[in-house]
Image (cartoon, coloured by chain):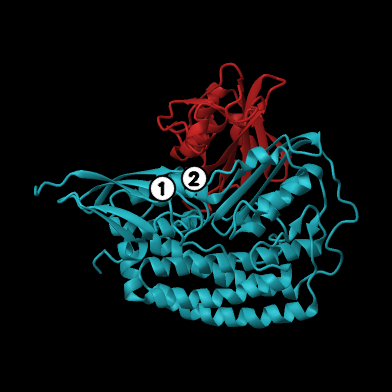
Chain colours: A cyan, B red
Amino acid sequence: MSKELKVIEIPVGPQHPALHEPIQLKIWVYGEEVVDVKVVAGFNHRGVEWLAERKTWFQNVFMCSRVCGICNTVHGTTCSQCFEDLGNVEVPPRAKYLRVLVNELERIHSHMIILAIMAEAIGFDSLFMLMMRDRERVMYLKELVTGNRVLADYVTIGGVRRDVSKETCDKILKYIDFIEERMKFYKKIWGEDPIVRKRLVDTGRATASQALSHCFVGPMLRGSGVKSDVRRDYPYAAYDEVPFNVITYREGDSWARMMVRVDEIFESINMVRYVIEHLPSGPILPKVVPRKLPAGEGFSKSEAPRGELVYHAISKGGMKPYRLKIRTPSFTNIHNGAFLIKGAHVADVPVIFTSFDPCIACTERVKIIDAKTGKVRIMPFNKLSKLKKL
Amino acid sequence: MSEEKEYPSLKEFFKNIGLEVREVKPRRYQLFVDPDKLPDVVKKLIDAYDGQVYLSTIAAVDFIDEKVFELNYDMSVIPLRCVLILKTRVPRDKPKAPSLVSVLPGARPHEAEVYDLLGIEFEGNPYLEKPFLLPKELANEYPLRKDWKGPGKP
């Protein structure tokens, strides 16, 4: 048995049921330290952009909602906005407010799930259970408004597909108070708990200039102190009328990225209250929505829970787009953020990767190769997370 | 990087470097740039706005009738809170464009994606690989080209 350490390649992924989609991280380790990392993607490439060129405008709105499970409403919203931009379709004010309502409910439950997953990744299983239990209330509210707890298909070209009643609004206000109370408790844990802070503070630190030059988006950019939010910078729906603060943290580490999400939940709660109190009356769809759109270009972007989501459509007129480009926030955050894993310990890899809020599965079972003996062990994700000494 | 600093408008900035930008929609600007000049323009843009510029995506389109590929670089300029679409065209029979990786490292996966799906080579990007997103069976094919007929069909 030699005592010399060698650089070893460890494949992390591509199967991981705790997250949503498969991706592989190839990491090269020298002892405990990660010296290089490569992202291997494409396990879930479904050719959506190719398919979009063969579907009608309306079919595309439904298909694009299926690009992502957790943030399906924001995909539907952005796709509809892109086509509205192309066809100059005017959206009624009530529909704009309802789009904000559903998108903010989605942001609350999406941030809660990644906070819960992070709690599990650092071995804080009771926090994971509690947050997932409370998240279910938000899912219930989403079901009340849209008719479905996950895949809503709520937004369509020109407006939204269902209206809300007075009773639904009252119920949302009642439940959202409960969520706020619970989140105050969770904020205290995320901000002050010594175990949480020991695992998250200083892991995967990115400076503001690194975050900008590597084109990070969303909470990853705001966690590095850059004040950038599509809702403020390039307002869509009714975001130019609904007041909110852009949350930033200067630290740039995994903890800052999670705290941005915690604070954004409070902003979203206030926005939901504002929308319900100021909901304009009127129709939710225009009288006529065109089935054919003119030749030209449509562009739309929005602030998905994970960051900026971009749709860019090129049309030559007719029933179908000539080209539809979709750029999801996780694409840029995962591929460009991988450099943050370099220099970290093996046990920090899941923590840093989870702090990206990746919309992709990866590290449920990891093959650990003992550098000294060459012995191969298969280890579940949660055990790997607990390896780092506290 | 303070928010209070005064930055020139995009119209002023492009006028200073001898180009003209068009506001196509509120907060959305667009202009055509020669592919060879693109890295230089992006470098100047990044310097002028203290690095607070990022690349959202590269939307590549195959205009088969005109025998060109159009590349739409969707940029975001944070201090001005606006979107800038830099358009460039490369010939279909010689699909090569200079890479932005040296001026903006974040362009790496976007260029790799375009290379994988449409086969446009970005000169100076050492990370281009094929397949990047596609399965291994499609390693020599470009599905988003308009003349692609299906897997394995010439």
Whether the residues at callouts 2 and 1 have beta carbons within 8 Å, the answer is yes
Horizontally, residue A180 falls left or right of residue A195, namely right
Q: In which quarter of the image is residue A345?
A: bottom left
Task: Please indicate, yes or no, whether residue A251 appears anywhere in the rendered image.
Answer: no
Horizontally, residue A122 falls left or right of residue A22, namely left
For the residue carrying disc 2, how many other residues have a C-alpha within 10 Å: few (<14), some (14-19), or many (20+)?
A: some
Query: Considering the numbered disc 2 on the image, is that residue within a helix, a strand or a loop?
Result: loop
* Mark closest to the chain's N terminus, 2 or 1: 1
Q: Which mark is residue A355?
A: none
| Residue that label 1 marks | A24
Amino acid type for the residue under numbered disc 2: Phe
Amino acid type for the residue under numbered disc 1: Gln
Horizontally, residue B137 falls left or right of residue A80, namely left
Say above or below: A16 vs B24: below
Along the line of sight, the residue nearer the viewer: A232 or A136? A136
| Alpha-carbon span between mark 2 and mark 1 | 9 Å
Q: Where is residue A27 in the image (x, y as percent from the top left)?
A: 32, 47
Q: Position of residue A124 (x, y in %)?
A: 37, 73
Along the line of sight, the residue nearer the viewer: B10 or B87? B87
Instruction: Read off the chain for label 2.
Output: A
Q: In which quarter of the image is residue A102?
A: bottom right
For the residue carrying disc 1, how many other residues have a C-alpha within 10 Å: few (<14), some (14-19), or many (20+)?
A: many
Task: Please indicate, yes or no, whether residue B56 appears anywhere in the rendered image.
Answer: yes
Along the line of sight, the residue nearer the viewer: B5 or A108? A108
Say which quadrant the C terminus of chain A sits in.
bottom left
Instruction: Read off the chain for label 1.
Output: A
| Residue that label 2 marks | A43
Say above or below: A367 vs A112: above
Say above or below: B134 vs A133: above
Say above or below: A140 vs A330: below
